[in-house]
Image (cartoon, rainbow, N blue to C red):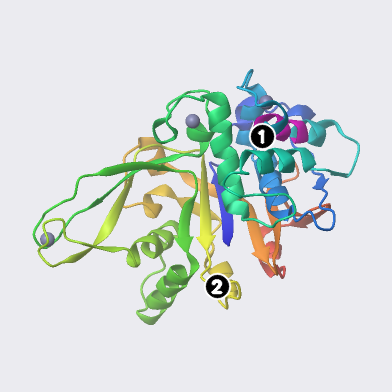
């Protein structure tokens, strides 16, 4: 189970590419069909958020070629839906082609199979990984530096983790890795909120709260085994344009929902989210919340910020509703 939040840099590249009156650079809103038994809400929610992410939508449109897999090509199927979002007169469109391509691609793993519910955050992550493979099929996923790879250029967080002992000074070898979604436990998040309230600590930024939550339960042994238990340090080395946070719930019937919603911040500073940030752009970046996928009562729905109207829009399969401001959004019972 996951609750995914998407942040992007304020303005994105809208200022440069958007011409007033040009409908091309702005996303219309349409629903996606989910017939009884299809259980496609996890996919529909991921697609809606991808479509509303201006940076992603425009980058995908500008890509000239890809390594095509024909009928089971996730890239073609996603582009097909995007094309229909742009040009169709229907209010709601089928997502069947993408659902089929996803099922075909992951049939060996028995993931995302037709008729079965699946995880929206993992679906989102896997679509991004597949797009990488369709653009640079031979590149290692973890060290992709291709300028045309939307996945790694726009979404990937390039990190290394290291544990440094305050007691004896020993440090572990830095372990580099990349992340498309940064997962945080809701239980750890709420524990941090609770501890801070108890100790009457100053209110941290949302990024700092997330960092505290993702490192608090993750204690390691000192690398030279001096007996200390130490926190892991994660260092961000690039400046991703879109940052995705996945909230992991410990149980399907969590009583933490309200607490989690209250702790959510509409801004995210990357220097708060990680122990250290090395890129100058990333140090200064203040990302704005532009999308959310929510899970409740065995069903996924999505919220996305619509750039043209500057309003939040709610997507529940074929249903699309304008919700207006972010405050109204938190009042909605989802
Ligand atoms: Zn293709
Ligand atoms: Zn890549
Ligand atoms: Zn030590």
Residue 150 showing in the rendered view:
no
Q: Is residue 170 magenta?
A: no
Residue at horizontal 64 percent and vertical 18 percent from the top: 64
Give the residues drawn in magenta, as a range: 74-81
Above-or-below relation of 167 to 317: below
State the residue position of label 2: 251
Q: Earlier in the sequence, mark 2 or mark 1?
A: 1
Q: Main secondary structure of the magenta part?
A: helix
Q: What residue does disc 1 label?
A: 74
Location of residue 173 in the rendering, given as x and y in whole percent from the top left corner: 20, 45
Most foreground residue, 30 or 252: 252
Q: Is residue 266 above or below residue 148?
A: below
User: Residue at image x 60%, y 46%?
Assistant: 124
| Mark 2 Cα shell of 10 Å, populated few (<14), some (14-19), many (≥20) | few
Question: What x and y, as percent, mark residue 198?
Answer: 38, 81
Specify whether 178 is left or right of 316.
Answer: left
Q: Which mark is residue 86?
A: none
């Amino acid at each position: 189970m996951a609750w995914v939040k998407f942040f992007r840099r304020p303005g994105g590249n809208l200022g440069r590419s958007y011409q007033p009156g040009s409908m091309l650079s702005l996303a219309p809103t349409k629903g996606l069909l989910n017939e009884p038994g299809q259980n496609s809400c996890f996919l529909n929610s991921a697609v809606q958020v991808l479509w509303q992410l201006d940076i992603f939508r425009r980058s995908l449109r500008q890509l000239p070629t890809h390594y095509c897999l024909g009928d089971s090509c996730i890239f073609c199927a996603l582009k097909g839906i995007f094309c229909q979002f742009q040009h169709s007169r229907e209010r709601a469109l089928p997502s069947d082609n993408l659902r089929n391509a996803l099922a075909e691609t992951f049939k060996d793993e028995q993931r995302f199979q037709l008729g079965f519910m699946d995880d929206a955050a993992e679906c989102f992550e896997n679509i991004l990984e597949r797009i990488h493979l369709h653009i640079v099929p031979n590149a290692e996923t973890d060290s992709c530096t291709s300028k045309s790879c939307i996945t790694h250029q726009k979404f990937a967080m390039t990190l290394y983790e290291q544990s440094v002992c305050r007691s004896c000074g020993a440090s572990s070898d830095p372990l580099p890795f990349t992340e498309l979604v940064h997962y945080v436990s809701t239980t750890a998040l709420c524990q941090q909120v609770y501890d801070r309230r108890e100790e009457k600590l100053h209110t941290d930024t949302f990024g700092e709260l997330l960092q505290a939550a993702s490192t608090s339960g993750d204690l390691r042994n000192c690398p030279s085994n001096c007996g200390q238990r130490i926190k892991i340090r994660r260092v961000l080395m690039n400046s991703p344009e879109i940052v995705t946070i996945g909230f992991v719930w410990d149980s399907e019937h969590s009583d933490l929902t309200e607490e989690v919603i209250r702790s959510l911040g509409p801004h995210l500073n990357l220097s708060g989210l990680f122990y250290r940030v090395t890129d100058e752009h990333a140090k200064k970046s203040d990302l704005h919340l532009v999308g959310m996928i929510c899970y409740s009562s065995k069903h996924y729905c999505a919220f996305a910020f619509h750039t043209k109207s500057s309003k939040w829009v709610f997507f529940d399969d074929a249903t699309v509703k304008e919700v207006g401001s972010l405050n109204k959004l938190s009042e909605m019972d989802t």
